[in-house]
Amino acid sequence: MTEVTYYTQEGLDKLKEEVHYLTTTGRQLISKAIAEARDKGDLSENAEYDAAKEAQGLHEAKISKLKATLASARLIDESKLDTSKVLALSIVKIKNIKNGATMTYQLVAETEADMKIGKISVKSPIAQGLLGKSVGDTAEIDVPAGKIEFEILEISR
């Protein structure tokens, strides 16, 4: 049984675009590489052909995995999100109680996570510690560096 994953419209569109690219252009590029390697002679001693066939297998596995993810993907209507507590797709402003640093994260599906733009996976330790909490609550979260205590300052969508 595949796990249901919740996506923003942007994340779902990116996933669909990647599947489309891999099944069209990606497959064409792999086929071309196999044909070029095949033209180079004896297949039993052709390392380039073996590498192209292996790349094809990995490519098809990636397509299969993404299609399974897409099949279990659910779009969340962000306008209906409850902002009284931290949920998937919430945007949360938190403060590190020890050093006073504040940061803002959006909790997203694993495939949408990108720390550079403040999107963290709902499966990350920080997100797991924040889920279900409300503004004013504190969350003690186990991270690789030890325990960190955060205060939830704001929840939005």
Image (cartoon, grey):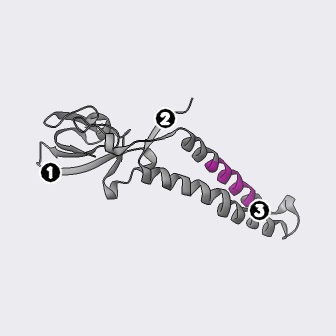
**Inter-mark Cα distance, 1 to 2:** 34 Å
> Of label 1 and label 3, which has the lower sequence position?
3
Q: Which mark is residue 101?
A: 1
- What secondary structure characterizes most of the magenta part? helix
Judge the density around disc 2: few (<14), some (14-19), many (≥20) Cα neighbours within 10 Å.
few
- Residue located at (55% from left, 42% from top): 69
**Can you give x and y, in whole percent of width and height, for residue 2 in the image?**
55, 33
Residue neighbourhood size for the residue with mark 3, other residues' Cα within 10 Å, grouped as few (<14), some (14–19), many (≥20): few
Q: Is residue 88 left or right of residue 147?
A: right
Question: In the depicted view, which residue is nearer to us: 24 or 139?
Answer: 24
Task: Identify the image quadrant of residue 125.
Answer: top left
Magenta span? 52-63
Q: Amino acid at mark 3?
A: Ala
Give the SS element for disc 1.
loop
Give the residue type that dot 2 points to: Val
Residue 68's spot in the image, x, y percent?
59, 41
Residue 13 locus on image (x, y percent): 49, 54
Q: Residue at x 85, y 70 (%)?
A: 39
Per the image, the residue denoted by label 3 is: 47
Q: CA distance from mark 1 to mark 3?
A: 54 Å
Left or right: 103 as drawn, with respect to 69 = left
The residue tagged 2 is: 4
31 relative to 69, above or below:
below
Instruction: Specify whether 61 is left or right of 90.
Output: right
Classify residue 96 by image quadrant.
top left
Q: Residue placed at 76% from the left, 58% from the top?
A: 50
